[in-house]
Image (cartoon, helix red, strand yellow):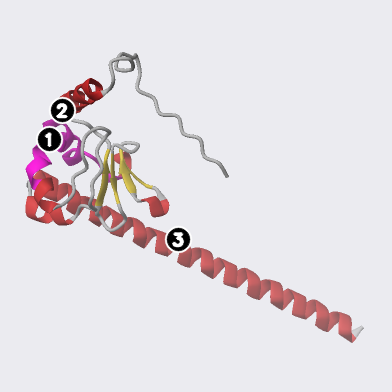
């Protein structure tokens, strides 16, 4: 009988200890997530401030190169090229969108993938580095079409007339 009472007390203490530990972990996790959100908000705000103030010296160092652009536009390879092509990528409409954005409404933290503006229009790594601009300015659209037209001219005449560009890949495993 004594064994049953001791066993019941040990089980009760073990459950209590387990629940107390679990509760502590949940509180700490929530606190850590809250700290991460504050840090991400500061990073996004620093990026927004650079765009708003046209601080290209700081911005060029916040880009992960090469910054890829939509096919057929060449990627932005380095800081000098970023400065040269900044106005092509960041036109008034995109700048207005970034500067007018609200962290809670317009930016989404997507775990280790980074932070996105408006469902992926622009992506920052968690350390405020720019990793993708999926927006395309009218200047870039025009350049892209020119490049595509020139590429089509290079194709043999038997295949240079088509309705859609398509690539089909097969991967063997």
The residue lying toward the viewer, choosing from 132 and 75, is: 75
Between label 3 and label 2, give the one nearer the viewer.
2
Magenta span includes 113: no
Residue 143 circle label: 2
Magenta stretch in the rendered image: 83-103
Q: Residue 19, percent across and down?
A: 63, 69
Mark positioned earlier in the residue sequence (2 or 1)? 1
Mark positioned earlier in the residue sequence (1 or 3)? 3
Cα separation, mark 2 vs mark 1, equals: 10 Å
Cα separation, mark 3 vs mark 2, equals: 47 Å
Who's the residue at 64% across and 75% down the image?
17
- The residue wearing badge 1 is 88
Left or right of residue 17: residue 26:
left
Q: Are marks 2 and 1 in contact (CB under 8 Å)?
A: yes
Placement of the C terminus among the 4 image quadrants:
top right
Left or right of residue 135: residue 119:
right
Q: Residue 146, percent across and down?
A: 16, 24
Who's the residue at 22% across and 31% down the image?
136
Residue 30 circle label: 3
Q: Residue reaching furthest bottom?
A: 2
Q: Residue 46, percent across and down?
A: 18, 54
| 38 w.r.t. 147: above or below | below
Q: Residue reaching furthest right?
A: 1
Local packing at callout 1 (Cα closer than 10 Å; few below 14, some 14-19, many 20+) is some
Residue 72 circle label: none
Magenta span includes 86: yes
Left or right of residue 67: residue 15:
right
């Amino acid at each position: 009988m004594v064994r049953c009472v001791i066993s019941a007390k040990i089980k009760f203490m073990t459950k209590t200890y387990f629940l107390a530990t679990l509760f502590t972990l949940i509180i700490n996790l929530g606190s850590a997530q809250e700290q991460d959100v504050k840090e991400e908000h500061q990073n996004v705000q620093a990026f927004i401030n650079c765009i708003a103030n046209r601080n290209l010296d700081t911005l060029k160092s916040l880009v992960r190169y090469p910054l890829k652009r939509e096919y057929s536009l060449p990627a932005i390879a380095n800081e000098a090229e970023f400065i040269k092509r900044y106005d092509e990528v960041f036109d008034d409409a995109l700048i207005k969108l970034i500067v007018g954005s609200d962290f809670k409404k317009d930016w989404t933290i997507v775990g280790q993938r980074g932070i996105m503006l408006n469902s992926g229009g622009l992506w920052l790594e968690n350390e405020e580095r720019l990793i993708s601009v999926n927006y395309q300015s009218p200047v870039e659209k025009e350049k892209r079409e020119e490049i595509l037209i020139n590429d089509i001219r290079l194709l043999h005449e038997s295949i240079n007339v088509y309705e859609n560009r398509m690539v089909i890949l097969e991967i063997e495993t």
